[in-house]
Image (cartoon, grey):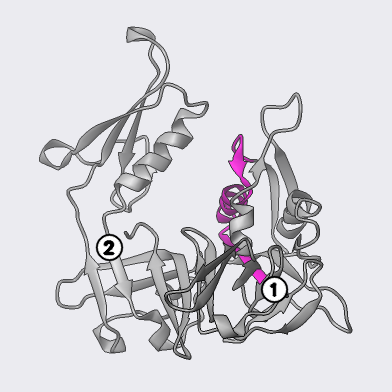
Amino acid sequence: MELILCAENGRELRRLDYSSADFELGGENDFEVTLPLAFWQDDLAFGRRIFEPGTENGGVIGGIKTDTSSNTITLTGYVWRGYLARRILEPPAGQAYRTVSGDLNAVIRSVIDGMYDGVLTGSQTDSGITTSSFSFDRYVSVLDGLNKLLASKNCRLQIVYVQGENGEIGHAEVSAVPIADYSDQIELSQDSRVNFTLTKTKNTVNHLICLGSGELADRTVLHLYLGPDGQIGKTPYYTGMEEIAETYENTNSEDLETDSVKHFEELIASTDFSMDVESLGIDVQLGDIVGGRDYITGLSMKKALAKKITTVAEGKKTVQYELEGNE
């Protein structure tokens, strides 16, 4: 994997020599690049950028660790997605929510342009997909806010570091792209000759009693139910021996239903699925959907990719995928 080192202003300095690297997209959203002490140069300084051309792998050096026992220096920092996760969307003064309308890429530009000194910018090309009067949750991270907006339009966040042409400065470009559902295109099963594990649990919570603010008879109570298709609604489906109920208490919630649905989704993430997606040669990105079927047991599922970890060690590049709801 080729890594380029840039100055604070984004001007490319040189190709970076290193011994190992790890870029985590999703999860912690950080990176770690290790090099022998002999490879150290004074241009490796705080605030300088590292990136793999044409990909999301990259970030800004925020930590430098010297280990004399192994004669190595490790550079650490947040990937571009990590910076989106560490800024907060606030409602405008005097308004309850920040509400946006228009092309998704135009909305992204309105949110992040000017926030990151031009290092992260929204795509100048329209996505062709629009939203109308979408309200961001109050005091949510930029990353979570944009992810929720895009998910409402069946889209995902794409980040690619774009190198400058003819001496121009590069930048990380953020855009909205449609989610690719590989579960409909390719059924990953025994026939695919791909190793996978699939664990599915049916006796999970299917009735959540949500308790909000108030006292006794005046307390806010909301009932949420799990349907046969895995969707959460307000109509009971499972009854008798099949009903599994649990309470959720949140007396400080400003939006009890939204917070309760999020908690319910965490509770029902009971299908565990992992596979060697890379061996199929599919370029799966965060938010894309993959699926699988076990012909022996008849179990099947599909989930969104929640984490992508690119690792380079001893000259070999590997990519590890983790799906939504997996631990």
- At 21% across and 47% down in the image, what residue appears? 204
Side of 211 relative to 185 (left or right): left
Q: Most extreme residue toward the front, as rendered?
A: 68
Closest to the camera, between mark 2 and mark 1, is 1
Q: Quadrant of residue 96?
A: top right
In this picture, which residue range is highlighted in magenta?
A: 136-160
Which is nearer the N-term, disc 2 or disc 1?
1
Q: Quadrant of residue 322?
A: bottom left
Q: Amino acid at mark 2?
A: Asp
Question: Which residue is disc 2 drawn over?
Answer: 272
Frontmost residue, 17 versus 136: 17
Frontmost residue, 74 versus 247: 74
Measured as percent of width and height from the top left, residue 309 is found at 46, 72
20 to 145, vertically: above or below: below
Frontmost residue, 65 versus 164: 65
Q: Quadrant of the C terminus?
A: bottom left
Question: Which residue is disc 1 drawn over?
Answer: 161
Q: Most extreme residue toward the left, as rendered?
A: 241
Q: Amino acid at mark 1?
A: Tyr
Frontmost residue, 238 versus 304: 304
Check disc 1: other Cα within 10 Å, few if <14, some if 14-19, many if 20+: many
Measured as percent of width and height from the top left, residue 6 is found at 74, 75
Side of 112 relative to 203 (left or right): right
Side of 305 relative to 246 (left or right): right
- At 77% across and 64% down in the image, what residue appears? 126
Secondary structure at badge 2 equals strand
Measured as percent of width and height from the top left, residue 221 is found at 36, 21
Label 2 to label 1: alpha-carbon separation: 32 Å
